[in-house]
């Protein structure tokens, strides 16, 4: 599940080696001095075109994901989930094949920075601190947080304040917003257990090693379905968590793009707006149980969420 390919060239590496045009050769001598003075030149692709042009020329895009339903996961050997199906529909219009690279959730953005894949399609929450590192497409869904507890909820946990007051041991995945929610609520550090994935946190709950785990509502339902244990149960919260800015937390997830791939992000943003209008976006989301309450406002942008205070 958590493999990171390092023995072969990445998709971007292949594009760079395939790049180089006659026009670039003609100006290379002119640019050499200035590039040396500037310490080299950046770019959005090796072929002299835009990042999106390079992807279309290669005919393939590699997507980092964490193998977590319902956003991006393997089923019957095929990539699926809300994020993956949206991306497949978009790239199909450009004759580009979608390939996946499985990475632990906390490693998704570092892997993007390291050029191991082209974008991240994992239903990742759009948070200001993440926006400092990478760019996000429009919010694709909105979601509240839920808990899973031992069958019968013996500690009566229905809110983060209950976690604080009950001395419960709290679990979640690495690199996720639910860590922040627990810290802001005042759950002591020694009672917050962070696992490599939500599935691992659920397994710990089922084994009685922790008392409560937190995840987004739809994701938690999928996690518990996969766990298939009669020792745990799902609980909706009676009070929303509070984020680090002091606001009631609602999660908005989207696709993540490198800073240098703005043309690709803009193309995907335009496509998603059109898919909203023709209803194909809603159809894809509905396949995975997302209803009207999970559809973000059409005028809500990644820029709004990145600058949230």
Image (tube, rainbow, N blue to C red):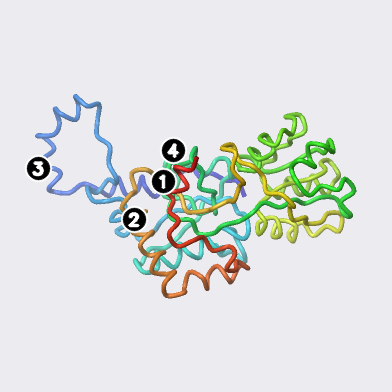
Badge 4 or badge 3: first in the primary sequence:
3
Tag 1–tag 4 contact (CB < 8 Å): no
Residue 298 visible to an observer of this rendering: yes
**Figure check: 204 above or below 269:** above
Depth check: give the residue in front, 129 or 110: 129
**Figure check: 188 above or below 74:** above
Q: Nearer the viewer, mark 1 or mark 3?
A: 1
State left or right for residue 25 relative to residue 132: left
> Which residue appears at 83% of the width and 54% of the height?
232
User: Secondary structure under badge 2?
Assistant: helix
Numbered badge on residue 266: 2
User: Secondary structure under badge 3?
Assistant: helix
Quick one: label 1, few (<14), some, or many (20+) residues within 10 Å? many
User: Secondary structure under badge 4?
Assistant: loop
> Which residue appears at 22% of the width and 47% of the height?
48
Q: Which quadrant holds residue 247?
A: top right
Depth check: give the residue in front, 175 or 16: 175
Badge 1 or badge 2: first in the primary sequence:
1
Tag 1–tag 3 contact (CB < 8 Å): no
Quick one: label 2, few (<14), some, or many (20+) residues within 10 Å? some
Badge 3 or badge 2: first in the primary sequence:
3
Q: Nearer the viewer, mark 3 or mark 2?
A: 2
Q: How far apart are the two marked residues, 1 and 4, measured between alpha carbons? A: 7 Å
Q: Which residue is mark 1?
A: 135
Tag 1–tag 2 contact (CB < 8 Å): no
Quick one: label 3, few (<14), some, or many (20+) residues within 10 Å? few
Q: Which residue is mark 3?
A: 26
State left or right for residue 8 relative to residue 267: right
Numbered badge on residue 190: none
**Figure check: 147 above or below 161:** below
> Which residue appears at 67% of the width and 43% of the height?
173
Badge 1 or badge 3: first in the primary sequence:
3
């Amino acid at each position: 599940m958590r493999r990171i390919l390092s023995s072969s060239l990445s998709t971007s590496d292949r594009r760079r080696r395939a790049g180089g045009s006659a026009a670039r050769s003609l100006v290379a001598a002119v640019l050499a001095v200035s590039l040396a003075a500037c310490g080299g030149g950046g770019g959005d692709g090796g072929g002299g075109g835009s990042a999106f042009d390079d992807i279309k020329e290669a005919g393939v895009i590699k997507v980092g994901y964490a193998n977590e339903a319902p956003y991006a996961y393997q089923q019957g050997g095929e990539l699926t989930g809300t994020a993956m199906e949206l991306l497949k529909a978009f790239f199909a219009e450009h004759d580009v094949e979608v390939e996946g690279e499985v990475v632990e959730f906390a490693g998704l953005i570092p892997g993007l920075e390291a050029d191991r894949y082209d974008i991240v399609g994992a239903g990742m929450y759009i948070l200001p601190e993440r926006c400092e590192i990478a760019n996000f497409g429009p919010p694709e869904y909105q979601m509240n947080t839920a808990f899973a507890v031992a069958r019968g909820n013996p500690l009566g946990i229905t809110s983060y304040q209950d976690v604080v007051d009950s001395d419960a041991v709290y679990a979640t995945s690495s690199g996720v917003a639910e860590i922040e929610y627990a810290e802001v609520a005042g759950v002591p550090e020694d009672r917050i257990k962070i696992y490599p994935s939500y599935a691992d946190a659920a397994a710990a709950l089922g084994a009685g090693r922790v008392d409560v785990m937190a995840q987004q509502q739809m994701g938690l339902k999928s996690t518990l379905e996969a766990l298939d244990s009669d020792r745990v149960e799902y609980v909706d919260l009676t009070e929303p968590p509070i984020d680090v800015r002091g606001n009631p937390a609602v999660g908005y997830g989207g696709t993540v793009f490198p800073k240098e791939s703005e043309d690709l992000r803009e193309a995907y943003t335009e496509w998603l707006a059109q898919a909203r209008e023709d209803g194909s976006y809603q159809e894809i989301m509905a396949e995975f149980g997302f209803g009207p309450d999970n559809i973000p406002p059409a005028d809500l942008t990644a820029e709004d969420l990145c600058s949230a205070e």
